[in-house]
Image: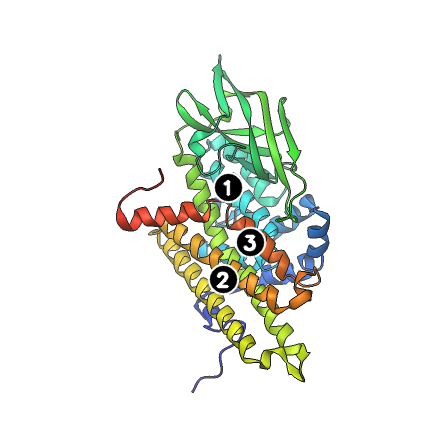
Amino acid sequence: MSSSPDPRDFLDLDAELTAEDRAIRDAVRSYAHDQLLPNIAEWYETGALPAAELAKGFGQLGLLGMHLEGYGCAGTSAVAYGIACRELEAVDSGLRSFVSVQGSLAMYAIHKWGTEEQKQEWLPRMASGEALGCFGLTEPDAGSDPGGMRTRARRDGSDWVLSGSKMWITNGTVADVAVVWAQTDEGVRGFVVPTNTPGFTANEVKHKLSLRASLTAELVLDGVRLPESAVFPEVRGLRGPLSCLNEARYGILFGVVGAARSCYETALEYTLSREQFGKPLAGFQLTQRKLADLVVEVNRAGLVALRIGRLKDAGTLHHNHVSFGKLANVRSALEVARTARAMLGANGISLEYPVMRHMSNLETVLTYEGTEEMHALSLGQSVTGIAAFR
């Protein structure tokens, strides 16, 4: 008979990883444990993040745009990128968002849709962490319906002039370049906007109760004048921005497995060491039932993520697979976090433990990059063939 399952990897999912995947896992986990974990509670409490320092460290590790090819990017497998997201989000969702926005939104957009000149100008510096990017799609009045965006770009001679605003933009206040999507007479188009361009302003979003270890901005574009070379040349309509969102959502469905794992492991350690009525909390039936539920959800989410990663590496991934993963895994992670929070009692609300921080972050992850409702409707359309969005 085989040995008893490892409580931290009950289904031995890491045995399914390649040697390269495991090496990346170990490198990111070690960096996260040594450089990120000791500081995350303070960053969360103060709402601050040392962006330049983090970018340098992530760049040296090769995490920025790691799943992209060329231009200084590592060109890893999709699964390896997912594993890196998992290890970062095991510390905090804000840190995974930092890497995800840089690599899967800003860099991916330029890599997928940009000109060779745009790629050469930005991607090597972004991969090294020398330059930071952000992604301007969401607006104050256009979230789930990006087609309702009001930001416009008009031609003026050989130039483009952008006017409008974007909201909830991660890394906006520290970005060197913004990928901005705007309505034009030719449909929605994407623009590569250096943030030092006159008329571009990034205002910090304050008073957040979630994702506090993340820098969030409102972007204001007041007659921002750009040359023709700033526009993505080929893509028109929402196909461009939605392709980028699908990349970011992929990172989320892996990342939240890390957050769930952190909450489960914290609850396990706490209930094994905390005694009440003369024995550890883990010795009570109700506690063991909760721990059983947590280990099932964490491992089930891990299986979903790994399967979707394999589909992505095989080139057979459909965007509804990603909707499945985000819907299922964020829901599981949030339930794990809520249950674990209660298992820690009063200590569950303290920053000395990661659980309520994860729980609060996951409330945001539930709704960004597509709300739970939108992904449910995407799956509903996929299985019925009937669109019910309106």
Q: Nearer the viewer, mark 1 or mark 3?
A: 3
Q: Mark 1 touching mark 3, by CB under 8 A?
A: no
From the image, tell me which residue sits under label 2. Answer: 20
Q: How many marks?
A: 3
Local crowd size for mark 2, using a 10 Å CA cut-off: few (<14), some (14–19), many (≥20): few
Residue that appears at 33% across and 49% down: 380
Tell me if residue 148 comes above or below residue 334 in the rendering: above
Local crowd size for mark 3, using a 10 Å CA cut-off: few (<14), some (14–19), many (≥20): many
From the image, tell me which residue sits under label 1. Answer: 105
**Residue 49 as seen in the image, left or right of residue 322:** right
> Where residue 18 sits in the image (x, y, percent)?
45, 65
Which mark is drawn over residue 348?
Answer: none
Q: Nearer the viewer, mark 1 or mark 2?
A: 1
Tell me if residue 164 comes above or below residue 72 in the rendering: above
The type of residue carrying mark 1 is: Leu
Q: Image quarter for residue 341?
A: bottom right
Q: Nearer the viewer, mark 2 or mark 3?
A: 3
In this view of the protein, can residue 202 be seen by the observer? yes
Please name the colour scheme applied to the rendered image.
Answer: rainbow
Q: CA distance from mark 1 to mark 3?
A: 20 Å
Q: Mark 2 touching mark 3, by CB under 8 A?
A: no
Marked residue nearer the N-terminal end (1 or 2):
2
Q: Does dot 2 land on a helix, a strand or a loop?
A: helix
From the image, tell me which residue sits under label 3. Answer: 362
Image quadrant where one finds the N terminus: bottom left
Marked residue nearer the N-terminal end (2 or 3):
2
> Where residue 23 sits in the image (x, y, percent)?
54, 63
The type of residue carrying mark 2 is: Glu
Q: CA distance from mark 1 to mark 2?
A: 24 Å
Q: Residue furthest bottom?
A: 1
